[in-house]
Image: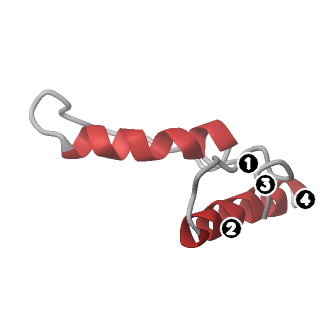
Amino acid sequence: MDPQTKPAIPAGLNTEERKVWEKLLQVKAQREKNNEAAPRVVIVTDLPDDIDDLLTLIELIPLDNLGLIK
């Protein structure tokens, strides 16, 4: 798919990465069609102690931006 047709898909992704984003957008469209609310995610973290929590938060940002989680 062309980034111009799917503005939520970041530019410069390889084929496999693009497939993941397309699947996420399909999930979002299906939820909207069924009037399903985004699941709420609660994170308990110890950010100053290690980096794995920070990486988790960074990975969740796009899901939040797309409205797939709250």
Q: Give the x, y percent position of residue 9.
A: 69, 50
**Residue tagged by mark 3?**
36
Looking at numbered disc 3 in the image, what kind of residue is underneath it? Answer: Glu
Occupied quadrant, residue 67: top right
Evaluate if marks 3 and 2 touch, with contact meaning CB atoms under 8 Å apart.
Answer: no
Q: Residue furthest right?
A: 33
Query: What is the basis of the colouring in this image?
Result: secondary structure
In terms of sequence position, does the residue under pointer 4 or pointer 2 come before the other? Answer: 2
Q: Dot 3, how many residues are within 10 Å of its Cα: few (below 14), some (14-19), or many (20+)? A: few
Residue nearest the observer in this picture, 4 or 65: 4
| Residue 24 on image: x %, y % | 66, 60
What's the distance in space between the residues labelled 3 and 2, CA to CA?
17 Å
Q: Does the residue at mark 3 contact the one at mark 1 (Cβ under 8 Å)?
A: yes
Q: Is residue 48 visible?
A: yes
Between the C-alphas of marks 1 and 4, the distance is: 11 Å
Q: Name the amino acid, label 4.
A: Lys
Q: Amino acid at mark 1?
A: Ala
Q: Quadrant of the N terminus?
A: bottom right
Q: Which mark is residue 33?
A: 4
SS label for mark 3: loop
Would you say 27 lies left or right of 14 here? Answer: right
Q: Quadrant of the C terminus?
A: top right
Secondary structure of the residue carrying tag 1 is loop
Of tags 4 and 2, which is closer to the observer? Answer: 2
Q: Secondary structure at mark 4?
A: helix
Sooner in the amino-acid sequence: mark 3 or mark 2: 2
Q: How many numbered marks appear?
A: 4
Q: Position of residue 15 (x, y in %)?
A: 60, 71
For disc 4, the neighbor class at 10 Å (few under 14, some 14 to 19, many from 20) is few
Label 1 sits on residue: 37
User: Is 20 on the left or on the right of 52, as rendered?
Assistant: right
Q: How far separated are the C-alphas under marks 1 and 2?
A: 18 Å
